[in-house]
Amino acid sequence: MKEDPLWQCPKCRRPFAIRNQPHSCGAFSVADFLNGKPPNAIAMFERFCELVASCGPFRFAPVKTRIGFQVRMIFAAVNALNETSMKCHVVLARRLENQRFDKIESFSPRNHLHCFKVSSIEELDDEVVEWIREAYKVGKQDHLR
């Protein structure tokens, strides 16, 4: 099945699966997000990036307050990063109840945002890897085929 091309915002050039997707245009970077963060926080972020990269190609989708991870859609993000923790989310095609999720928001029957926090690299374990792999498929929009 042929995929529709991504629409690019004419102002910021950011790609989207949906034409005219509402968003905040801006020139943001991963480096800006990490600027001034302590080494242990950066190490957690880098480990999260490695787990995402193990799923396949992706692009960073940085905005002022977070770093999104995108294939066709944003499927995961690091929302906050400091010396004691990293707040993340993954988007799954199902609502997954798990005590590690602080909050779950359902946007549609096949798009559920699952928020969680990690306080160490060790907490980026096999369970988180499974969530990221499942979310990556959502990012590719495999759940819609």
Image (cartoon, helix red, strand yellow):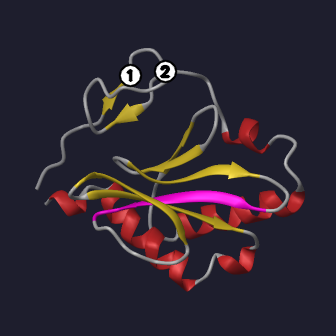
Near mark 1 (Cα within 10 A), the count class, few <14, some 14-19 or many ≥20, is some
User: What amino acid is found at the position of numbered circle 1 in the picture?
Assistant: Cys
Frontmost residue, 64 versus 141: 64
Secondary structure under tag 1 reads loop
Q: Please name whichever residue, 48 or 109, is drawn nearer the observer in this view of the structure.
A: 109
Pointer 1 residue: 9
Instruction: Give the image location of residue 95, x and y in percent.
Output: 32, 68
Residue at the location (43% across, 27% down)?
A: 23
Magenta-drawn segment: 85-93
Determine the residue positioned at 18% across, 47% down: 3
Asked if the residues shown at circle 1 and circle 2 are in contact, with their CB atoms under 8 angstroms apart, the answer is yes
Circle 2 sits on which residue? Answer: 12
Q: Against 126, is 82 above or below? A: above
Q: Is residue 70 left or right of residue 47?
A: left
Would you say residue 88 sits in the magenta stretch? yes
Answer with the quarter of the image where residue 22 lies: top left
